[in-house]
Image (spheres, rainbow, N blue to C red):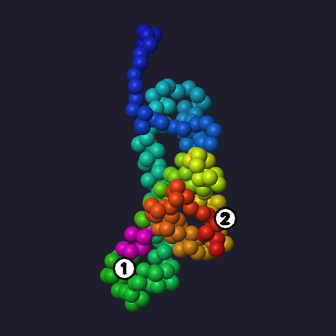
Amino acid sequence: EDGTFEEFKTNPKRYTYLLGQNETGTTAAKRLKELAAKKNGFDFELKDVVDAFSVEKLNDEFFRKYKEQFQIFNNYLIEDAKVRYDIFEIDRNEKDTDKVVNELPIRDFTKKLLGRLVFLYFLQRKGWMGVITPASGKDVVWKSGYADFIHKLFREAKHQSKFHSKYLTELFYNTLNNENRENFVFLICKFNS
């Protein structure tokens, strides 16, 4: 209040946002837009900016959207009779009392798949997915991967209707979960055979 300079530090993990080349900046732009709308322009204080960018707010939004997607996908699998009975080995003559128990494998599958997809999005955001390696196998630039790796893999898939069983399963089990890959590299073209 008296105009003297006051210095304080915040935990960098609580207020870190990457802006710049190869960063979408979507979250930062959305937060600034919401802040400007709430305060009728740019008449706000530092506290307003700190609140707008708090990790708790972002976490709440992430988990709300995650829960919505979980419900959509889980309900889709539950309603798809062929998937329910054939893949999850559910008794076709289930009683209403068995419904919740029979749907447990579907919920577990949905949780596992969405968790893995979130992990893939983390890897792709880091630029680690689809990295092109030099013929020598040396001097790999691990930040040079595709920012849209998963979408690109889907677009280029010859068998999109089998994206999970043919592509994601290969990626999860025979690629990422395989410590014997030379230089941690795998070939995307293998997926399209």
How crowded pointer 1 is (Cα within 10 Å; few <14, some 14-19, many 20+) is rated as: many
Q: State the quadrant of the N terminus.
A: top left
* Foreground pick, 14 / 41: 14
Q: Position of residue 40 (x, y in %)?
A: 58, 32
2 or 1: tag closer to the N-terminus? 1
Q: Is residue 114 visible?
A: no
Residue under the point 48% across and 75% down = 77
**In this view of the protein, which residue sits in the foreground, 4 or 177?**
177
Q: Which residue is drawn at 44% across and 13% down?
A: 5
Q: Helix, strand, or loop for circle 2?
A: helix
Q: Main secondary structure of the magenta part?
A: helix
Please provide percent x and percent y for residue 107: 40, 70
Outermost residue on the front side: it is 136
Residue 107 part of the magenta-drawn span: yes
Element at label 1: helix
Numbered circle sitting on residue 102 = 1
Q: Quadrant of residue 26?
A: top right
Q: Is residue 154 left or right of residue 84?
A: right
Position of residue 52 measured from the top left corner of the image (x, y, whole percent): 49, 36
Residue range in magenta is 104-110
Pointer 2: what residue? Answer: 155
Give above or below for 144 relative to 15: below
Q: Which amino acid does label 2 sit on?
A: Arg
Q: How many circles with numbers are drawn on the protein?
A: 2
**Image height check: is 4 above or below 139?**
above
Residue type highlighted by circle 1 = Asn
Q: Is residue 135 above or below residue 26?
A: below
Say which quarter of the image contains residue 100: bottom left
Is 59 covered by the magenta stretch?
no
Considering depth in this image, is 27 or 125 the residue closer to the camera? 125
CB atoms of marks 2 and 1 within 8 Å: no
**In the picture, which quadrant includes the C terminus?**
bottom right
